[in-house]
Amino acid sequence: MTGYRLFGAPRQYIQGPGLVDRLAELTAGHGNYPLLVVDEFVLTELGARLTASFDERGTDYGVLPCAGEVTRTNIAAHVTRVADRAYDVVVGIGGGKTLDLAKGIAIEFDAAMITCPTIASNDGPTARVAAIYNDDHVLCELGKLEFNPSCVVVDSELISRAPVQFLISGIGDAIAKKFEAEGCRLGTGATMQGTRPLEIGGIVAAGCYEVLARHATEAVESVQKSTLTPAVESVIEAVVLMSGIGYENGGLSIAHCMTRGLMSGRGTRSVLHGYHVAYGLLVQLVLERHRDDVFDEVAGLLRAIGLPTMLADMGMTDASATEIRELAAAAMTAPHVLNTPAHVTEETLVDAITRVEYLARH
Ligand SMILES: [Zn+2]
């Protein structure tokens, strides 16, 4: 499909405080018979708030509490519990794993998908794909909905009250997209749509970076106090909508390649995706030989927000040469490794990681 330009985005996006109380009305245009796939913990926390609007409207609906990893086995187990009904729209409510499980279930039902994230830790809510792992917790495939979610419902009040590290992760995931789209444009690879990057992908990703550079620090401070401010609203839009559209149509690059090894590295395995991406972005900037002032601006921004600028910040203290080589080798297995103008080999990646570690200390 490299001769085509294919644009993907959610059909509708709505963001604001208190939207979980209006889920029935927001779902109505997308299907008649909704299945709410809800994280068990969220179900306990929000309880009747999630279903009240459906009861008031007299909508026939199902509720499927969900838990566990996003594996083929777990998706099948959840589908079995509701397979006797013909749901035509799946509403995923929870964090990243819940939304990916819900996407897996929507694929099985051939149903429309609505995402309602309760944290903003990455761009998953707008994305067409779900990251599916094998039983050994290794990323093994990307489940694909036929289209992006029909609707993304973002209750900004809920998100502003969640622990701040989720929003920080979302910012880390989003801040890299400008450089990743640029890398993809100058490289030879493809976007998630399987086509060469679109202009609009790069423009939205660059805009996403602008919004974060302006508002991210203030937004993090607000969420630390569980306060919803205009800066938080802008950052949520950048993290969920702009980051999603930017990467699906602009492409991923080295920053995301680096998450492969960090996912299972010593210490690094216990931090969220966006922290990996933020560190990966610094590696990409060095590898692509960006100017020093660009590197310094990004590193300063990451530090101000509480994102890592060296492996020790994620728990990999005194990384050995073997550990650094393992990170480089894992990054080489990602398909986005072609999405950069830089010469990428295990060796050049080892050098770039080593350089980032040096710069963080000096
Ligand atoms: Zn990501």
Image (cartoon, rainbow, N blue to C red):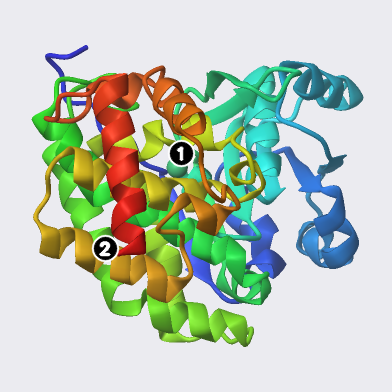
Image quadrant where residue 171 sits: bottom left
Residue linked to disc 2: 298
Ligand 1: quadrant of the figure? top left
Residue at 13%, 33% (x, y): give it: 185
Tell me the SS state at disc 2.
helix
Residue at 78%, 57% (x, y): give it: 54
**Residue 11, x across and y down, in percent:** 41, 44
CA distance separating discs 1 and 2: 25 Å
Q: Is residue 176 visible?
A: no
Confirm or deny contact between disc 1 and disc 2 (CB under 8 A).
no
The C terminus - image quarter: bottom left
**Residue 30, x across and y down, in percent:** 56, 42
**Residue 104, x across and y down, in percent:** 66, 26
118 left or right, relative to 192? right
Q: Residues within 10 Å of mark 2 (few under 14, many from 20)?
A: many
Q: Residues within 10 Å of mark 1 (few under 14, many from 20)?
A: many
Q: Is residue 226 visible?
A: yes
**Residue 96, x across and y down, in percent:** 63, 45
Tell me the SS state at disc 1.
loop
Residue type at numbered disc 2: Val
First of labels 1, 2 by sequence position: 1
Residue linked to disc 1: 127
